[in-house]
Amino acid sequence: MKIKHTLKLIDGNFIPSEARKVINDLLSSKINYHQLEAFSIKERFNGDVSNSEKRITELKEARKILEEITAYANEKGLCLKIQGNIEITILEK
């Protein structure tokens, strides 16, 4: 089996409102994942959730940047090209 795989997640041109929705949905999903992960770690193990909290902050900042980009593109009547790949590497434990 191959060790590294690349999946094409997004590839296209979008009007600002579509771009905002597509990327915001991804960001929301990731934020939700980290919130649930942090809750689980706290409740089950009373463990350190600093990594999840840091990632949530980063994702919320990305959301603000997304809003700025799409607002600018919308104001100027521009479209946005979005390309997003996910790389998956199989590692040994």
Image (cartoon, rainbow, N blue to C red):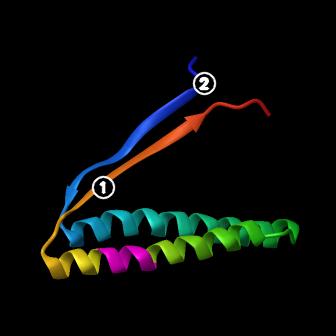
* Furthest residue in direction top, as rendered: 1
> For residue 31, which quarter of the picture?
bottom right
Q: Which residues are magenta?
A: 64-69
- Give the label, 1 or 2, closer to the camera: 1
- The tag on residue 3 is 2
Q: Residues within 10 Å of mark 2 (few under 14, many from 20)?
A: few
Amino acid carrying label 2: it is Ile
Question: Would you name the residue on which mark 1 appears?
Answer: 82
**Residue at 44% across, 75% down:** 63
**Residue at the image point whose x is 69% and y is 68% from the top:** 52
Extreme residue toward the front, this view = 76
| Image location of residue 74, percent across then percent down | 19, 77
Q: Nearer the viewer, residue 92 or 37?
A: 92
x and y percentages locating residue 22 in the rendered image: 32, 63
Tell me which residue sits at (44%, 80%) in the image: 64
- Percent coordinates x, y for residue 90 in the rendering: 64, 30
Q: Is residue 65 left or right of residue 11?
A: right
Please give left or right for residue 60 compared with residue 82 in the image: right
Q: Horizontally, is 15 left or right of 48 in the view? A: left
